[in-house]
Image (cartoon, grey):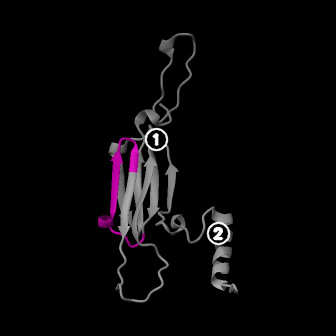
Amino acid sequence: MIATWNVHRTLDRLVDDVMRDVTGTAFGSAQARAFELPLDVRTTDDEIVLECDVPGLTQDDLEIHVEGRTLTLKGHRAYRGNADDKVWLGRRYGAFQRTFNLPELTDAEGMIASLDAGVLTLRIPKRPEAKPRRIAIGTGSGAGSMKQLGEDGS
């Protein structure tokens, strides 16, 4: 029996090897095909801000749940074309979910969510005791001569 060379299989293997070296994930693997939810997280003195790219999605396509210290973002992007169309799909469709463990310093009850121009923004306030503050240095040895300064330094 003569084995035939399959150029497509060879190229697929080559691409998978390169992608695995670069990303740690093979290009055609289930992990690589999973719906991605790109996001940024930043911290200020007052809050943690999470911004997620969700282009084309509406408020009805998204769910936000908090249970204890666990924040879960869920959503679904539906394919809006005709099932009989012959298409090449470059965007991801289907359900997605991301879960985050919120730090103890956050106040999940005060969380605010907004959706604008395809960006979902979550603002999670920090509890007052977690906010930075300036401590005054008193003179003398008595505790009565020391006081804590407010946020404005007075």
Q: Quadrant of residue 32?
A: bottom right
Task: Judge from the rendering whether residue 128 lies leftward or rightward of residue 21; answer left or right.
Answer: left
Q: Position of residue 26 (x, y in %)?
A: 60, 67
> Relative to the observer, which residue lies in front, 14 or 88?
14
Residue pictured at 56% horizontal, 72% vertical: 28
Residue that lies at the very extreme toward the top in this rendered image:
141
Rendering coords of residue 31 (x, y %): 52, 64
**What residue appears at the point 45 percent right and 54 percent down from the top-left corner?**
50
Question: Which residue, given by chain and number where applicable, does mark 2 sit on?
Answer: 19
User: Measured from the top left, where is residue 74 in percent x and y?
Assistant: 37, 59
Q: Quadrant of residue 92?
A: bottom left
Please tell me whether residue 43 is drawn above or below residue 83 in the rendered image.
above
Q: Amino acid at mark 2?
A: Met
Closer mark to the observer between disc 1 and disc 2: 2
Mark 1 falls on what kind of element? loop
How far is disc 1 from disc 2 in space, using C-alphas?
A: 34 Å
2 lies above or below 70: below
Spot the residue most to the left. 60
Q: Is residue 145 above or below residue 24?
A: above
> Is residue 147 highlighted in magenta?
no
Task: Work out which quarter of the rendered image holds the N terminus and state it.
Answer: bottom right
Q: Which mark is residue 103?
A: 1
Mark drawn on residue 128: none
Q: Magenta residues?
A: 55-71
Looking at numbered disc 1 in the image, what kind of residue is underneath it?
A: Pro
The residue that appears at 35% across and 47% down in the rendered structure is 66
Question: For mark 1, does the 10 Å Cα neighbourhood hold few (<14), some (14 to 19), or many (20 or more) residues?
Answer: few
The foreground one among 89 and 123 is 89
